Amino acid sequence: MAQRNVYSSKGEPEDAQSAEEVLHSVMQELDALHENVKGQLNQDITRLQTEKNHLIEDIEDLREQYRKLQSQQMESLSGRYIQQQQLWLKQLAQVLAHNLQDLLVQRFNELSANSGHSLSSPIPSGEFPIPLPPSNYDERASQLLAALDERIDRSFQMLEQDLTSYESELSVRLNNMKTLELQGEELLQNLVNRIREELEEEEEYLDNPFDAQDSYPEESTNSVRPQLLQPTPVETPREPLPEPSSVPSPATAKAASQVQTGLVLALSSAVVLSLFNVCLRILIKGKNPRMVFGLFEFPGVVTPGFGNSLLILLMRLIVVMALMPILATFLYPSVWKDIRRLFESGDRALWGKVLGSAFFLFLSQVLIYLAIGNIPAGIAITIFFIYPIVTVLGSWILFGSRPSTVGFLAMLGITAGLILAGSPSFAVQAPGGGNVGVGVTAALASGITFAGYVLLTQMAAGKLHPIPFSLVNFAAIFVFSSLSLWVPLSDNFAPKIDQNVWPGLIVGGVVLGVLTLFSYLLNNFAIRFAGAALASVIGTLGPAMTALFGFIIINEKLQPVAILGMAVVTLSVAAMSVERIVAPQKKAS
């Protein structure tokens, strides 16, 4: 250690210069990437503006055609109205002429009969006689004119009634046309609004080209992470809750039932993971055989050690890699398209973050196995919960997200709880004869490396869906485990397996792999129903449930101080999770 420090002090100027060069090159690459993305987005925005102008022109053309059709319809209606008026006037003139002719013939016949000069035959219709002038000609002419006036008035009244009826009918048709015009304008307005909304959505997509549901929010403090090997879950955006009313709506009841289902699934996932930890504890040999359920003794399969932890992880991953592709396809049918897109993208930065997060998670897995093999599982998982502190501090340094007052208090609570939970292990010899120092150190290192996985996952946020990300992580960890066992290791780190325990090791690997996938499936559906935030709150029960199942299954007792520390850690981590749920709601309000 001293030699490495001296060497570091000698090469400090060169390291500083190389760090500045690397930082300068990274800044240049970021600027080039920024200019490239900005240019592409400007081109897309220009194209969308051009399409928008074309759509506006098409809409104006449609409106102009609508006006022309409307004017043509009005002209055709007015022409037909004039033709009908001319026809009515012609018919009226014919009727008047016919009535006037009949009236004149009748009057001339009456005049002839009264004057004594009646004709030998009646005057045929359509012929005008030439009677002799009567003595009372003026009186007869007045009567004739009065009758003619009466007939003309009656005809004009009938014509007025017909004109009134036609006018009302024409008014109704004009009102219908106005209604159709309003409906057409409303349809055009809806079309324009829909086109505008689509353009705005495309512009928003250009501003943020990654789907919000394909991004990774901040890592939730969920104890299932070291066992599931899964990335940070996606927290789907929640619909705003409706105002409370006297009668709950069916949608509200359905949403509440879904949240309840999600909480039950999250609790089931935490139970399965706690069983996973206890099964791992049973699989590793102790100083004395462990009594399972107080019925039979089980001596264990492998001794605690780094190499044996690698071997257990590999046996578990063989089962996981055999079943995970089927489960991933069921949960997310586009998983293979996303993986193929990832391979074809050639994004070295993204690949570096994905493989780096997988490597940190691989180390975290091996170390937590080593910790559970040396100290009680509940204590190991509790100490592992140092990772929220490292994650928050790392996010503060890398992303500038300063923790709130609640976050600082929660970190103090976690630190105090870790001290309370770990101190009894040093005072009393660990149950099962494990190395307390190795177990506590491995649990702390597991939490720190898991925090590195969380930070790298946040850096890769938005570029890969969680399920393809998880599948790639499984495959990468499988490769890391295989390579670690293939490389020759020293005696202290190499696997030490008795040939007679291979059947038990295989069965144990199958059980651990099935529990892993079963918990992964439950947790995934819990996130879908209740959201990642609520699922993470339930996940904070992991240490307490692990200790509870350890006591029930293998009678692994803990000191009261350790239980108190476990409770403090659980409450502190839960406070951080709840604070992350409440903070966005306060900002929104």
Image: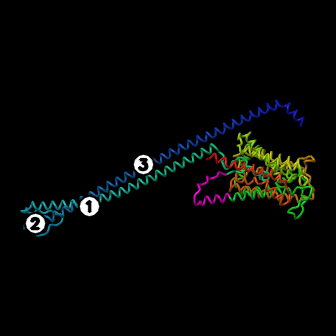
Query: Which residue position is annotated with label 2?
Result: 112
Amino acid marked by disc 2? Ser
Taking the spot 85% from the left edge, 31% from the top edge, the residue there is: 9
> Residue 190's x, y, as percent?
51, 51
Residue at 18% across, 59% down? 149
Q: Secondary structure at mark 2?
A: helix
**Is residue 515 something that shows in the picture?**
yes
Image quarter of the N terminus: top right
**Which residue type does callout 1 highlight?**
Met
Q: Are marks 3 and 1 in contact (CB under 8 Å)?
A: no
CA separation, marks 1 and 2? 33 Å
Which tag, 3 or 2, sits closer to the chain's start?
Answer: 3
Tell me the amino acid under the disc marked 3: Lys
- Residue 62 lies, in percent from the top left, at 47, 48
Q: Earlier in the sequence, mark 3 or mark 1?
A: 3
Look at mark 3 in the image and give the residue it sits on: 68
Per the image, label 3 sits on a secondary structure element best described as helix
Tell which circle, 1 or 2, labels the residue nearer the N-terminal end: 2
Tell me if mark 1 has few (under 14), some (14-19) or many (20+) residues whose alpha carbon lies within 10 angstroms of its own.
Answer: few
Q: Nearer the viewer, residue 126 or 439?
A: 439
Instruction: Left or right? Give the position of 75 relative to 6.
Output: left
Question: To which residue does mark 1 refer?
Answer: 158
The magenta span reads 236-259
